[in-house]
Image: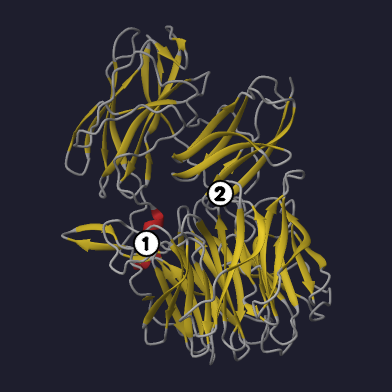
Amino acid sequence: MPKSKLFTVAALSLALLVSALWAGGLPLKNNLGDDRPVVQLSHPGRYVKNMPARDEDDFMTLRWMVSRDGAVNWSEIYGAGDLGMWEVDDGDTIPAWGNASYDFGAAVAPGNFLHFVVILNSFSDIRNPNQRVNGIYDVRVDMDRNVVINLIAAEGNDHFAFSDVGIDQQGNLYAVWSKIISDSVCVLMASKSTNNGAAWSNPIQIAAGLAPGSPYTHITYHVAQHFYAIFLVPNTETGVYDHKVAKMAATMQGNPEVINLGAASMMNITYYIGSSNPIDQDWNNGQLYFAVRSENHAATIIGSSTGGEWTLERIPGAQRYPSIGLDQGGQNGMPFVFSNFGVPAPGGYHKNWYSYDESGYGGGNWIIPPLVLDSLLYDGARDLLYCHQGVWTSSGRLVSGCNVWGQFTPEGFQVNHSNNNGETWANPQKLWSIFDDGLMGGYIAQNIIVPGFDNAVFVAFCGQYGETDFDGPDIAGVTLSSFALGQPWIVTANVSDPSGIGYTDCNWTLADSMSWEYAEADSGNVDDEGNGMYYYTMPSDTMNGRALANGDSIWFFIYAQDALANDGFGYENLIIVGQGWTGVSRRVEIPAENSLGMNYPNPFNSSTVIPFALSHGQFMRIQVWDTNGRLVATLFDGRTTAGRHEVIWKGEGAPSGIYLYTLETSRERFVGKMTLIK
């Protein structure tokens, strides 16, 4: 996932509206069956006003599986209590008491009690049967599937993000999470439980200076005399992210120490997901290891320490969420790193890899190139291996797990195991698939393989049975009333989806402008679910800030979103003003992943365009910063749709110099650099 990419003009984009949609156009009317006004927007994308307040987060339910024989045979999928998030009431689904976080931690205490440490902060005003509050919770399940839920800390006026959990040999639990206090202040918190999660100590702050846009953190899963929580700090001078750890005594007494690890990564997603385990230590001797992506993604940086200085090594040619695995049985003392190679071209194989230090702890003799464990043929959309993780069972069996990722969501989760420290492996087992089982498994964040006791191993993840609609609305029957100057241009389209329609609009641009504008439907002949014929009015005299003339080329397409927030795009159509409508031409391109493009022109002296791409509709923010880390401008902050977009910064009131621009979503942060010359 590159930090920046220059989008060509030929790649049609959904762009920022830099002015009002169009002057003198018809007023928009609500077509979804009520009298609420529809307001024209002057920012990129859409704020979907009439659809239910839910998206993919709302389907995330804590689930788990267990193998009692070291990953050979597995149980069915179990739920974790009342985290269903949606309850059925007279045929309607309504919010229950909160949404499971994208990034949760999981640990197994003696007696095989599985603990989810998860942030829940979307409680419904409609139904909150247990009168819970927004905060971080411990959700404990046992082998009989009993569930106990305890509050670790309440959010109050702050916001929590990215939790993780570790455990010591006595079974004490240690939770860490980020607390976002304001747009510029974020700190790292910790709490401890000595009674299997029944009660937790008062939270303490163990680090400050985290960026609210990249508050990712992980704790050493195994806690010895100290625990270490790794986190990212953006470096405004270099444009990359420095890795640091907060070192805290396991007693939770004394002052924490913040240590710079001497490693940096280009992006903030080197370990943001729950299934990544970037740092760990050996219970017996406290030997520490971490693994992160390098500055240019061309290698994995591995650090080792006995608690003092860190020694850094590199495994070249590898990337994507590296994970550390340490054998707590002490049979060989060899550290393992698990990850996968970059995405291949269609027709190539995507591969999981692993490496280990043949000389044992601190030996500096890693297997290079790393060894390939699994591979899948990549067709350009489906079948990628992500979030490769490895753990040991209590009997010394090495178990690996990874997501099998599709175009929109993981299609499943597969495991593999070795009885001889990785020399040979069994055939991979796919534990579940959203297509085979009707299970929505969430995104790549939600699968964690966790070692238990008595040769047990667990998989903790998010998902909900029965949700299989990942397709956007169908858009057909597009017609155009006229293409002549001075006449109304009415576009009609039939929009339908089994889940119902939540939103739709028409988008247009001059071919030599590529600055997209849009309008919602004027009226609709639709049923109670919003399915049916919609009507959209395009301007016929002025577009993109200039008067139209015969012979101008105009592109337009229809966008729609169903009630589950799946995006749908019609084909792009070409109009030659005064001459004709060519009809269907080409399909709107939906990027496979989020990205931030290179601004152009650069350097600039009046205004510059910042392109970006989103793989699905989501909330995001684009901001400009000076090199001292001070916020200069917020160019957009809200929800927008899948596609390619642009924002414009005019640099008004800003002195000449170098500036950073950032794109932040709920899970990622991208950084670019530009130069203003006046």
User: SS of the residue at dot 2?
Assistant: loop
Q: Amino acid at mark 1?
A: Gly
Classify 10 Å Cα crowding around label 2: few (below 14), some (14-19), many (20 and above). Answer: few
Q: Amino acid at mark 2?
A: Ser
User: SS of the residue at dot 1?
Assistant: loop
Residue linked to disc 2: 182
Q: Nearer the viewer, residue 427 or 158?
A: 158
Vertical side of 407 occupied by 411: above or below:
below
Q: Residue at x 48, y 41 (%)?
A: 590
Q: How is the image coloured?
A: secondary structure
Residue 71 seen in this snapshot: no
Q: How many marks?
A: 2
Q: Nearer the viewer, residue 495 or 135?
A: 135
Residue 182 seen in this snapshot: yes
Vertical side of 489 occupied by 523: above or below:
below
Q: Are marks 2 and 1 in contact (CB under 8 Å)?
A: no
Quarter of the figure that contains the C terminus: top right
> Real-space Cα distance between discs 2 and 1?
22 Å
Residue 38: name its quadrant.
top left
**Residue 11 x %, y %:** 54, 31
Mark on residue 98?
1
Label 2 vs label 1, nearer the camera: 2
Residue 287: name its quadrant.
bottom right
Apparent side of residue 165 relative to residue 353 in the rendered image (left or right): left
Mark closer to the chain start, 2 or 1: 1
Vertical side of 666 occupied by 50: above or below:
above
**Residue 637 x %, y %:** 50, 38
Classify 10 Å Cα crowding around label 1: few (below 14), some (14-19), many (20 and above). Answer: many
Q: Residue at x 81, y 66 (%)?
A: 313
Residue 66: name its quadrant.
bottom left
Q: Nearer the viewer, residue 326 or 49?
A: 49
